[in-house]
Image (cartoon, rainbow, N blue to C red):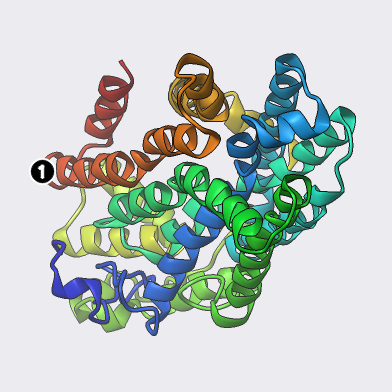
Amino acid sequence: MGITIAGLWQAPEINPVNHEAKSIPALNPCNVYGRVFLLSWWGFFVAFWSWYAFPPLLTETIKNDLNLSQTEIAISNILALAAALIVRLIAGSACDRFGARWTFAGILLLGAIPTALAGTVQSQSGLVALRFFVGILGGSFIPCQVWTTGFFDKSVVGTANSLAAGFGNAGNGVTYFLMPAIFNSLVQRQGLSETKAWRVSFVVPFIFITATAIVMILTCPDTPTGNWSSRRRDVQRHLDMRDTFFPASAASDRKGNASSIDSAGLSNDTIRLNTNQAHGHYTDAQAQEDDLLTAASWELVEKPTVESSLKAVGTLSTLTLLIVYFCSFGTELCTNSILGAYYARNFPSLSQTSSGNWAAMFGLLNAFFRPAGGILGDVIYRYTKSLWAKKMLIHFLVS
């Protein structure tokens, strides 16, 4: 199903097997799929806003107030990024164990605490410690992507993921607009001193982060079929409903063979169909049934173990994507941390606010280029039906 303008607000067509949406109702928060999409990118957005709230004001105000050297500022930038790395490693396993929604809300609430405490910083060591814990919010990208992946069909999931990532990632650009604007308002309209104003300004992202996490918990489900803890029962229920979707002729092939899910997450019928496919005994009806079993089994995510996690990390595909992501997004995060200071240093005529405005443009590019990458990936897959085509696109864009 292609993307249409009306699909932005109309209730989406639902895949009857896994209840995933075949369109993205981005402008319809009353619909559960639209609401999940909205909170996915918005939660990511406010997290990145707070995570990068320090650099726009470190250019001048915080630097002068705390008597910081450029080296001390660089150390705080490094630790803020290091915290995100640690949390992202943990967040992946947490999503597998508890579901993306609770992981997402947990990261937001944990990151909101040091955000609220930003005003208590009195020294360089205090700044480094606080920015490390604010860096927890950098892990929000993981549950954002896992959550949207679970709610949208494979025909549009690339677009959904890229839109959520792009809009959310733009938060590290918007913060270069917002934090100086909030700071200036507190100084010029509220009459606060600069020392007090920068400290009070962090209350604003704290409020947004906390409110977003609460709304996420109260108004959204874990998966399209309900609670994360019931996903195994959902797989079995989908297997039991096959006769609703396939002709009786296909069902007759299964007569007397009850379906069950084994400990590895594969049903007996899945094993049988894979065997038939390998031997060439593969009818159209069986092909359709295999698609259903694959879709149903997708919901079954086993609790991670240390052994399985290490095995996944060590695979060639994981290592390849890790290197690509390190070279692209890793570079972006480092660049965003110092852009405001770069413009201020190389263009002395620019004020803290003006240098922040220029620095914001880099982060705002995410709102266009991330969605463009996802949409292009979906188009390529639609015509090639090959994941290798998507992999080639990734390497082409990085190179």
Please, is residue 237 above or below residue 389 in the view?
A: below
Picture quadrant of residue 139 = top right
Q: Nearer the viewer, residue 356 or 377?
A: 356
The residue identified by callout 1 is 383
Say whether residue 133 is left or right of residue 157: right
Q: How crowded is the residue under tag 1: few (<14 C-alpha within 10 Å), some, or many (20+)? A: few
Identify the residue at horizontal 39%, vertical 52% (top origin): 167
Given residues 263 and 362, the one toward you in this image is: 362
Q: Could you tell me if residue 149 is visible in this image? A: yes
- Quadrant in the rendering for residue 188: bottom right
- Where does the image place residue 280, in percent across and percent down from the top left? 20, 43
x and y, in percent, of residue 127 in the image: 81, 35
The residue under label 1 is which amino acid type?
Tyr
Element assignment for label 1: helix
Asked if residue 302 can be seen in this view, the reply is no
Q: Is residue 228 above or below residue 160?
A: below
